[in-house]
Amino acid sequence: MEQRSRPRAGRRPGLRVGRVFGVPLYLNASILLLALLITVLYGELAGQRLQLSPLGGYLVGAGFVVSLLGSVLAHELGHALTARHFGIGVRGITLELLGGYTEMDRDAPSPRVDLLVSLAGPAVSAVLGVAAVAATLALPDGTVADQLAFQLAASNVIVAVFNILPGLPLDGGRALRAAVWAVTRDRHRATEVAGWAGRVVALGTALLVAVLYATDVLGLLALPLTALVALTLWHGAGQSIRLSRIGRRLPLVDLARLARPVFAVPTGTPLAEAQRRATEADAGVAEHRALLVTDSAGRPVAVVDPAAAAAVPEARRPWLAVDAVARSVADLPTMPVATDGERVLETVQAHPGAQYVVTAGEDVVGILHIADLAQLLEPHRKMNT
Ligand SMILES: [Zn+2]
């Protein structure tokens, strides 16, 4: 239902089942829970209503699961194919318990494209919903086909209507963001506004769930799932607000100031000796230097990992070469010192790690510590590393 432009972070979205229109399709394991719940609960209801055998009822339930997943897939394809039309790469579509999401390789370049990509999904759902309503009216009452068409109509209309609620992470929130972006010309401000609207939508959903339960419209069984929807919305809205705040601080990123200066020691230097020399060099300097290990020709080969170094007992440090607690420069992501904030964040998201090598031409001029970057971008957030 929502769209994310999240750089690949090494986390798999689920089981890859193939490609649709060239877009990789993933199924999250939570789908199994949904399939089981619907097959059993809806299958029993449909079985009673249509006077089917228990097995017949479950088959109708399973048929509904398949058509529901097909509807969600069509909705996501609406987003994905529209994005691709505007030259935005699509990494994949994932179907999961509460719907699905489309991952794009970057944000929309303009408010207009953002708006069109967001609305394409609900538009597909609305068209499917109307077609299913027409089918329900045309099919004879009390038949399996009529029952399925009715459920399909209901679910597509619900998906379309719910998704155009104007709060992130919903599609309507993205449309709201595009509108605020167009007016203010400030994408991060727009994301923050749509994120707060998302929190209002989440609270409204929670309130509605409570009212529907209190008035016996919602059964006890529907309560966990609808409460999960409200919680997921609240969490997604919070993430959007957080990202917008990070986005607004990105211009503050200046690698020349943020990266820790390096202190070079030759390969084979005992850890205790390297630390002693660096501390000496640090006298009068506020920040701690990063230990850079160089080969016999003075070329940088590795960077000491402060966490690994700190884990070595004091008594062992004179006997352990720095190389034992260092990571090869070749294994660490590299960024030129002039890299701007947006690109730094992209690199960090694409290659999660603790240290990044900052270069000027061929030279290593500093080491960026992820904790220093986090401190700059989110000064009020407690570090949980
Ligand atoms: Zn959507």
Image: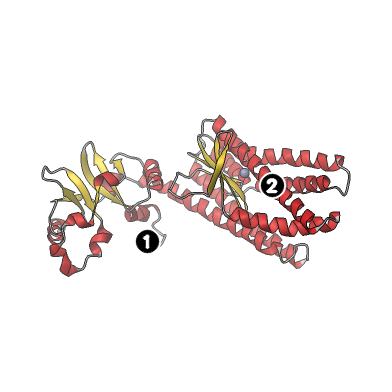
Q: Is mark 2 within 8 Å of ligand 1?
A: no
Q: Which mark is residue 66?
A: 2
Q: Residue at x 73, y 38 (%)?
A: 127
Q: Is mark 1 within 8 Å of ligand 1?
A: no
Mark 2 / mark 1, whichever is N-terminal:
2
- Seen from the viewer's position, the closer of residues 103 and 51 is 51
Could you say where residue 54 lies in the image, as x and y percent from the top left?
A: 79, 59
Q: Residue at x 13, y 64 (%)?
A: 318
Q: Is residue 110 left or right of residue 250?
A: right
Q: Which mark is residue 385?
A: 1
Q: Helix or strand or loop: what does disc 1 sit on?
A: loop
Q: Quadrant of residue 139?
A: top right
Three-letter amino acid code of the residue under disc 2: Val
Could you say where residue 338 lies in the image, as x and y percent from the top left?
A: 30, 39
- Seen from the viewer's position, the closer of residues 176 and 184 is 176
> On the rendering, which quadrant does ligand 1 occupy?
top right
How dense is the environment of label 1, judged by Cα within 10 Å: few (below 14), some, or many (20 and up)?
few
Q: Residue at x 76, y 51 (%)?
A: 60
Q: Is residue 204 left or right of residue 360?
A: right
Q: Quadrant of residue 136?
A: top right
| Distance in Å between CA atoms under marks 2 and 1 | 42 Å
